[in-house]
Image (cartoon, grey):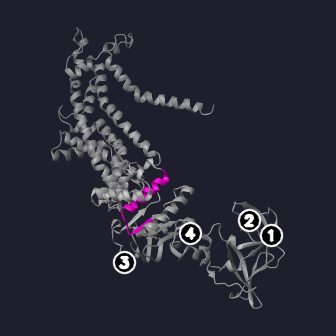
Amino acid sequence: MPGRPSRLLTFFFAALILLFTGGPVILSLIGSMVPDRVLFDDGKGLFSEGLNFETYRYIFTGQLPDSYSAENANPAMISDAARQVPRSLLNSSIVALSSMALNILFGAPAAFAFARYFFPGKGLTFMFLILSPLVPSVALVTPVYIMLQSLGLTGTQAGIILVHTAKALPFTILILSVFFRKMPNELFEAAVLDHCSRFQTFFRIALPLSLPSIGATGLFAFMLSYSEYMFSMVLSGDAATRPVSVVMAALARNTDVSWSLLNTAIFIAIVPTLVLVVLVWRFVVEGLLSGAVKG
Amino acid sequence: MASVELRNIAKSFGSVEAVRDVSLSIGDGELVVFLGPSGCGKSTLLRMVAGLEEITSGDLLIGGQRMNEVAAADRGIAMVFQSYALYPHMTVAENMGFALKMLGKPRAETERKVAEAAAILQIEELLGRKPKELSGGQRQRVAIGRAIVREPEVFLFDEPLSNLDAGLRAQMRVEIARLHERLGTTMIYVTHDQVEAMTLADRIVILNKGRIEQQGSPLDLYEKPVNRFVGGFLGQPQMNFIPAQLVSSGGATELAVGVPARRVLQFANVVAAAGGTIVELGVRPDSISIVDPMLETALPAHVVVVEHLGGSSLLYVQVDGLEELVTVELRGKTAFARHETVGLRFDPQRVHLFDGGGKQIESRAAEE
């Protein structure tokens, strides 16, 4: 049977990739529900004491897991930082959704202009856009901090949103401009003949046809912002503005942390992205597929 | 309705000259076809009329008004694109009414005009559908409908049928002809398909390398091509081009073809140079008849391939001394078979002589 071995190979590599992508998610889910004393004891089977949600309870309500209320337990392993997770999730969602919205708001029209029109300085500005992600973030931390400080935006969410938007915008514009460039020229010429101004051409023709791509790039901007650590750490102030990536780092830095608690925090941090991907991805894939069939 | 006038129109893309010094006037209500091979500048010319391409030099007048600087939407034209360019996210009715909507026309008026256009094209039942739910022919109708709704002074068609299969193309060709008759609007139609050009056009403009080679009624161009390019471009099967020599013989000039040379034609008004003049004989396949090869004015040839087309037959024959096969079109079925030797006789009233530069030499057959 021709094609059989290659199919097996496909499954093998798919499984391998899944191991590296899905594996950690599953591990953190299991780790979050198994008590520390089981995790740390090589002699016990993973599920020998069953699963519980006590660490989840602690994160959301502050009530210590039962095992840590027992004698000889070290409650110091239950880091206070874990209690910041729900708030940081909200912060991160606000920041990431804002960054996503701003990326679409500025990125889509900019990409359209780059894709379809000529204007003075087009080549130069586009080169800047392409090259700017090549500058290491570390090199930008100090100048960006000074800039935001002079604007009075350090320690605020607005500051982080601004930086995250700026960091994702080159990708948004690049991806969307490729998409807009692929749209048939005649469609836009027809729009010109139908009395559309440039803005109307964008708004009434290009935008409705590129919703799947815009969804995908928006998701990309969301995830970039959600997982960004360096600027979030430098620019965020107290717990009220701290995004989830900063809180996670604080948790993981503690060597005596409860593993179960850490896993719980990790899994909670993954959930918003998972939900968004599941919600948006279907829409994106459907859109891309219907576009692939020649219209 | 309006006339269209092009005065010394030229277009360059950087150093490439796509259209050079084209002057043309198109009468009110006329259907003019721009015909030529790909890259001849015909689409560029149309797009300049539409306002989608800037005019490098020269003047464009529509209805007597200079239009060079007028925006495409305000030129009173409507264009049907090769790819139809229907908006995929709108229904047929929305597609057709979009221009009026953008002009801020009342909805009732838009709907009435869309309904009228749909009735003309018999696509009423499609109005609620999206373009992807339509067949190629239906999309083409919608694209034409969109143009009709705008009530333009001039219709522009850019290879509108080239994405359709052969049967549908013939059907749509007839519909466009009927539409022109019904609306009486000036139409400019670009195609590389000579059958479309021959059947649709009031006048054909043949373009090559950005220049007009010849313009005129379809039959005029077919019967009196001014050069080798036009002769070869129009007509299916293609005109034969046979290398030949003009030689003086007594009072007349004779045309010698093949090795050994046979003097197959006599001309009354053509002068040959002292040592003979090298020319090309252009003769359409249907202007050649098969005669006895032993005749003195016949050109002997061997049959290489026979094609039976039902209503007619094509013989591809090899003439000694010629590189290319000569095509002969015969009516009805033919009894000739491969390897058979036949004699070719050229209809003296329907041959063309072209000089070394491809220009037509005025020739008149001598009385026999």
Distance of mark 2 from mark 4, alpha carbons?
24 Å
User: What are the residue bounds of the magenta stretch?
Assistant: B135-156
Q: What residue type is labelled 4?
A: Met
Distance of mark 3 from mark 2, alpha carbons?
52 Å
Q: Which of marks 1 and 2 is nearer the N terminus?
A: 2
Q: Which amino acid does label 2 sit on?
A: Leu
- Numbered marks: total: 4
Residue that badge 3 annotates: B64
Q: Residues within 10 Å of mark 3 (few under 14, many from 20)?
A: few
* CB under 8 Å between discs 2 and 4: no
Q: Which of marks 2 and 4 is in front?
A: 4
**Residue at horizontal 29 percent and vertical 26 percent from the top:** A268
Residue that badge 2 annotates: B315
* CB under 8 Å between discs 1 and 2: yes
Answer yes or no: is residue A127 visible: no
Q: Magenta stretch: residue B150 in it? A: yes
Q: What residue type is labelled 3?
A: Gly
Q: Which of marks 3 and 4 is nearer the N terminus?
A: 3
* Quarter residue B167 falls in: bottom right
Residue B342: mark in rendering: 1
| Majority SS type along the magenta span | helix
Question: Considering the image in quadrants, where does the N terminus of chain B appear?
Answer: bottom left
Establish if A245 lies above or below B98: above
Residue that extends furthest to the bottom in the rendered view of this protein: B251
Residue that badge 4 annotates: B198
Q: What residue type is labelled 1?
A: Val
Distance of mark 3 from mark 4, alpha carbons?
28 Å
Q: Earlier in the sequence, mark 3 or mark 2?
A: 3
* CB under 8 Å between discs 3 and 2: no
